[in-house]
Structure formats: C-alpha cells, structure tokens
Amino acid sequence: MAQIEMNMLSVITCGSISVRVFCPGMDKLVLDDREHKTHYPVLWLLHDEGGAAIDWLATPADRLAEQYGVFLIAPDQHHALCTDMKYGPRYEYFLNTELTAICRNCLPISDDPAKNWIAGVGTGAYGAVKMALKHPETFSRAAALNGVLDMEAVIQKALLGEDTGIRHNQASLEAVFGDLNAFPGSANDLFALANNKTENHFLFTWEEGSPHEAENLRLAEELGSSAEKVKLPAGSDLGSCQATLRTALTWLTR
C-alpha cells in the first residue's frame, strides 16, 4: 500500500489545496513501462462538509486502491459544496479542469472519461453526482455514499433559521449559491439536472435507517435505468465508509 500527499497552489481557487492519493498495489502496476504508456483508472473522492482530504485515511481507501488497481484521489474542497461559489472559489471549475490536469501531469492516470469516476460521502455525494451529471466529458460514473442530495431541502431549513445538518447556515449558503430562492431548477439542483438525458451511470448506497434514504431513492428514480441502489445494514460503515466505499469500488470495476 502506498499513499502520496500532494500540496499544490491553485490559480483557480487562489489558494493552496491538499490532495491525498491512494495508489494501486505493486502487483497491479506495469513496473517496466518505461515509455509510460499505461494509464490507470481513477476514482476521485469528495469528503463531507466540514471535513478534509485527510478524512479518507480512516476509510479502506488504501486497501481498495491496492486491491482493485485503481488510483483514488481525494482533494480538499473546503466549504464550497463542489460549486462555483457566488462569493468564493470556483470549485466545480477547479475540479473539472485544473485539479485533473495537475494530477494527470504527475501520475499515470487516464484522461478517458470511461476510466474517470467520482464518489463522495455526505455532501461530497451531492458534489460527485453533480459533477457526473454536468461534466460527462470528464466523469462517466458517480457513487453517492450516504449522500446528502436534496440541497433545496437544506436551503429551506436555512431560510427558516433551522439547523441544516451540514454545517452551513443561510449566510454561508448564500455565499455558495447566491439567491437561495433561485436555487430550485438551477444548474446546482440535482433533481433538475436529473431531467436531462445522460449516458452516465450512478450508484446510490446508504445504510439502513439513514435520514437521507428518501432523497437517495427519489433521485435514483428520477435518473431511471442509469441509477442503481444498494441499501446496507445499519452500522456497517462504522462511521468511515467501510461498507459503502467497498460497494462503490465493486460496482465501478465490475
């Protein structure tokens, strides 16, 4: 098992970004590829709101990268909710362009959308599904792990002064999305985006009893045959994607 910590200056976000890279096992690498012709599949991982790339160290990411021969790359995304913020960094643009370009320049990973997948946990799942819906030129599959997907419902809580459950309030959500009343049907609304034709594929996996089960089911139904659903036993994730991340890698590489 091998891990790499990359620290880079991003022109797009106007700041430094930390990225964790989990590498395939030695037996999965073509070690005598002196001309660097081999390019490996990559799963981009988005952490939950309030977290950081380092959170993935608590998950089975390193073992799964070794087992499946896939690079797993987890960037920081701060509080941007994988969005081109109204008042802040253009994180969606960064992830789709600058980050992927820098990593491909440093690592033997594929630029073929068929070998570029994206997954996220919690609000990171919202970002992962959004990226696959909006950027099929970069990502071909997305997996939502215990996903917080109905951002309109989160916004409605914020407008009522209630706890949103995702470490955001009305002011910070306005910094991300701008006019919150204009969110429904916008380019950041997953349920609106799901109405567009897509050839990409999506996995929604969550633990039994999850408070977000209904929104996962609803979005999967909106996506129709392009979506699959897997409900796992309660507690199987142990708070660190133990079951959902493995389920996603199995689905992605089958």
Image (cartoon, rainbow, N blue to C red):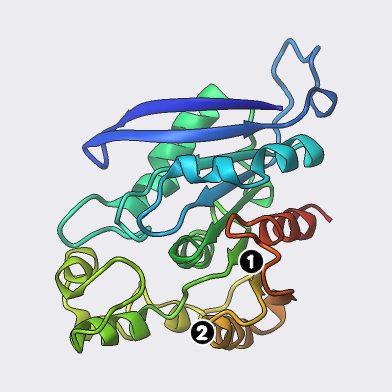
Name above or below for residue 115 compared with residue 209: above
Residue occupying image coordinates x 63% and y 88%: 221
Residue 195, numbered label: 2
In percent of width and height, residue 251 lies at 77, 60
Q: Amino acid at mark 2?
A: Asn
Q: Give the quadrant of the C terminus.
A: bottom right
Q: Quadrant of residue 102?
A: top left
- The quadrant in which residue 98 appears is top left
For the residue labelled by badge 1, is the local secondary structure a helix, a strand or a loop?
A: loop
- Quick one: 197 or 96, which is closer to the camera? 96
- Residue 217, given in percent of the width and then of the height, sits at 61, 85
Q: Indicate left or right for 183 with 100 as reference.
A: left
| Residue type for callout 1 | Asn
Judge left or right: residue 130 versus residue 171.
Answer: right
Please tell me how crowded label 1 is: few (under 14), some (14-19), or many (20+) other residues with Cα within 10 Å: some
Q: Is residue 146 above or below residue 119?
A: below
Q: Residue at x 32, y 49 (%)?
A: 78
Q: Residue under circle 1?
A: 200
**Badge 2 or badge 1: first in the primary sequence:** 2
Does residue 92 appear to the left or right of 3 in the view shown? left
Quadrant of the snapshot with the N terminus: top right
